[in-house]
Amino acid sequence: MPLAGKISDLYGRKKVFLISAAVFTVSSLCCGLVDNIYLLVFFRALQALGGGAFMPSATGIVSDQFGRQRDRALGMFTSIFPIGGIVGPIIGGLFVTYGSWRGIFLVNVPIGVALILLGLRFIPARRPVGAGKLDLRGVARLALLILSGMFGISSLGTTTSPFDPVFLGAEAFAVLMGWLFIRHTKHDKAPFIPIRLLRGPGFGVMNLINLLFGSAALGFGTLVPLYAEQRYGISQLASGTLLTARAIGMICVAGLAVLTLRRTGCRLPIVVGFLIVTGGLIMMFLPPLGVSPYLWLAVAAGVTGIGWDCPYQPPTTRACSWLLTRWRQSPAYAECSGSRDRLSRFPW
């Protein structure tokens, strides 16, 4: 995501957006046609590259178009995404239940083609806003840090010991890459991600908080259907609709969160959101109280959706707007870091 933001600064947001849409569409087609698990993993990785480049370039396009009203525009823009959380799980459940798994990839092809055609027609072309060159060494070190760290954590699924040599080796390499990345960022004249975005009593602490929050709310949220299937025996189609309940909760509070941004600041929505998400996760852990398991999980998913959008919408919008206006940086930094804002330094 930060790489896409930097490239969009250098070469134009519309161009990067359309290329990412093309990569996502072509890789989705390939995923739906392959009959080899290794090729499927490879094309899924390409699909992730295309999909990951959407948000920074799209956020930059919205920010460029709305000027001083970019905070509200970005808030309304991001509030549209939960609609995909309603439609996607239902369509995916229908494909898996009554058709083939290939359909969950092939359905992206006509959508991607339509997106490219609409983008060519309606997205205005602007001159690149950045200059310079890409920090390829920083990109490589950050990529190796993330890949090795994720590989090590994933290896725990095949072993019961945290002292497994594969896990320890991968995590040690991740620590080394993290140290090299920070060292490089401190001394490079034009680093991939400025060091001031990685430290400080406000921005740095919020990065850590959002890492923990994302691990709990987002990491577990993707496993809700599997949790429903294994614990309560709920069907694939029904368990997929639980994500729809979460998306409905997000949509219900999205507009309100945007409107309260300028009135309350970011502290109050963050604290309230964390408390609501905690309550929703506790509900999912507890057995149903006098209702069916599906209804209980649906209500809990809706509660977590409400809580998730409270700490996400206003701070992310403010972070993107602030980085653009104060540091003239790409909105990708706000998306990549997950930071919500400099709570201790911004004049609320």
Image (tube, rainbow, N blue to C red):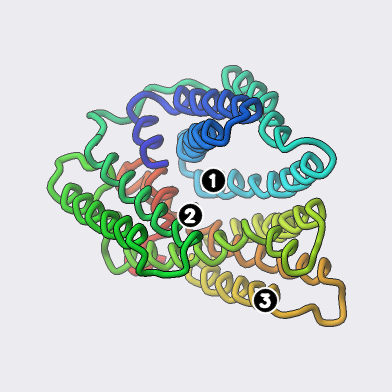
- Name the residue tied to disc 3: 285
Q: Is residue 177 left or right of residue 150?
A: left
Q: Which is nearer the N-term, disc 2 or disc 3?
A: 3
Q: Residue at x 77, y 42 (%)?
A: 96
Q: Nearer the viewer, residue 56 or 19?
A: 19
- Name the residue tied to disc 2: 316
Report helix, strand or loop for mark 3.
Answer: helix
The crowding category of the residue bearing disc 3, from other C-alpha atoms within 10 Å (few below 14, some 14 to 19, many at least 20), is few
Real-space Cα separation, disc 2 to disc 3, in angstroms: 29 Å
Q: Which is nearer the N-term, disc 1 or disc 2?
A: 1
Tag 2: amino acid:
Thr
- Foreground: disc 2 or disc 3: 3
**Contact? badges 1 and 2 (CB < 8 Å):** yes
- Name the residue tied to disc 1: 74
Tag 3: amino acid:
Phe
Name above or below for residue 68 compared with residue 228: above
The crowding category of the residue bearing disc 2, from other C-alpha atoms within 10 Å (few below 14, some 14 to 19, many at least 20), is many
Real-space Cα separation, disc 3 to disc 1, in angstroms: 34 Å
Where residue 177 sits: x, y (%)?
A: 24, 51
Where residue 2 sits: x, y (%)?
A: 38, 42
Tag 1: amino acid:
Leu
Real-space Cα separation, disc 1 to disc 2, in angstroms: 9 Å
Where residue 273 sits: x, y (%)?
A: 58, 70
